Image: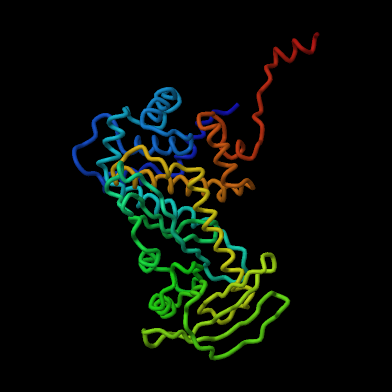
Amino acid sequence: MSHCNTILNQILRIIPRHEFESLAHKHHVGRKFRTTNRWSQFTAIVLAQLSGRMSLRDIVENMKAQAHRMYHLGVGLLSKSNLSRINNNKPYGMYEELFGLLLSKCQNRPQGHDFRFKNKLYSLDASTIDLCLNIFTWAKFRKNKGAIKLHVGLDHSGYLPEFVTITDGKTADITAGRRIDFPKGSIVACDRGYNDYEWFNSLTVKGVLFVTRIKTNAKYEVIKSNPVNSKQSVISDEIIQLKAAEKHLAKLRLVTYLDPKTGKEYQFLTNHFKLSAKTIADIYKARWQIELFFKWIKQNLKIKKFIGTSKNAVMTQIWIAMCVYLMISFIKHGSKIPKSMQQILRLLQLNLFEKRDLVPMLLGIPIKIPIDKNQQLLFGKS
């Protein structure tokens, strides 16, 4: 049987070590490391994310127990105190930049969304991560509550979180949304939390298309009514002019759709005039993928319970969790494994320190154990 490194080693090899060390040097502050390094920190938190470790002591003890299988990873001596010190003091910006590096590797894999149009499709939303204000005193959200907010622009090609911003809990969704520079010609699906007429105008000027739900109290004038196909559950398709204090608002399209399953009526606002009304409704329905993304990372990665209380430690843990998501996505799409992200994660958790090929293990290909010829002859005689 050929020699194999551990599954953990093969996962970490997705990141070129020289590129990681370049980022570590760029973001280094303070004195030079003596017994450990940023690679040790990264390996420890990746291990915690994949194996479900919940505390600094748990992480360090697990690494010590597996020391004989981790020597080839280049991990330095790590204790509870120095892991805590690195998490608190070494800038988390390194892992934000590492996330961008991994994202570019994932984007190089040919993927696509489920629609016929060739435009890039994004879903934009935010999710609040609750924190205890007595412990995380820097994360004040409400009077007696702490929180931070994760803003994501999800690319439907491979469901990659292409645009990620982490803010305090008070930051409005639209405030973070305005900072995202979507590529020209792309389509952005977002909920009513992003209803801002000035932002709609700026997207239109940039050539970015959007699909959202109109607010119930919005005032508008119908300029034209387009013919509709009632068999597709489309009630109306109108060209409208919004009425607001802002001047020179662009004309928009309002599609009214009746969900055949629930009987509920929805009104979708868009600046895309060429796609069918049914496709506009389907684009907004596809926005559910970002809800599934938030649900997945909260259920499967450690971004709700933290191993440090400082802002830098929390941000470090979240950015490394996002890197782990991209690493799993890279494995799935790069190897064309027909399993879900959750199935892949479960298999990785169970086999982190097994010495076997990663892809055959995920595909369920059994290990071929060579038979000793002497034993074969012996059994043949009996």
Q: Quadrant of the C terminus?
A: top right
Q: Specify the farthest residue to the top.
A: 382
Count all numbered tags in the image, as a single digit. Answer: 0
x and y, in percent, of residue 272 in the image: 53, 79
Q: Seen from this angle, which residue lies furthest bottom? A: 223
Residue 75 placement, left or right of 367: left
**Along the horizontal axis of the image, is 8 left or right of 236?**
left
Q: On the image, which quarter does residue 88 sit in?
A: top left
In the rendered image, residue 92, in percent from the top left (x then y), is placed at 31, 47
Residue at 58 percent of width and 68 percent of height: 283
- Residue extending furthest front? 143
Picture layout, residue 36 above or below residue 23: above
Residue 118 or 90: which is nearer the viewer? 90
Residues 204 and 185: in front is 204
Horizontal placement of 377 versus 222: left or right?
right
Vertical arrangement, residue 97 with respect to residue 342, above or below:
below
Residue shown at 41%/78% (left/top)?
A: 197
The quarter of the picture where the N terminus appears is top right
Q: For residue 100, which quarter of the picture? A: bottom left
Viewer-nearest residue: 166 or 265 = 265
The residue at 64%/47% (across/down) is: 338
Q: Using the image as rendered, state which of residue 328 and residue 221 is in the foreground.
A: 221
Residue 305 in percent (x, y) is at 41, 40
231 vs 320, left or right, is right
Residue 231 in picture, x, y percent from top left: 73, 76
Position above or below: 382 against 314: above
The way the protein has been coloured in the rendering is rainbow
Residue found 58% across the figure and 85% down from its top: 238
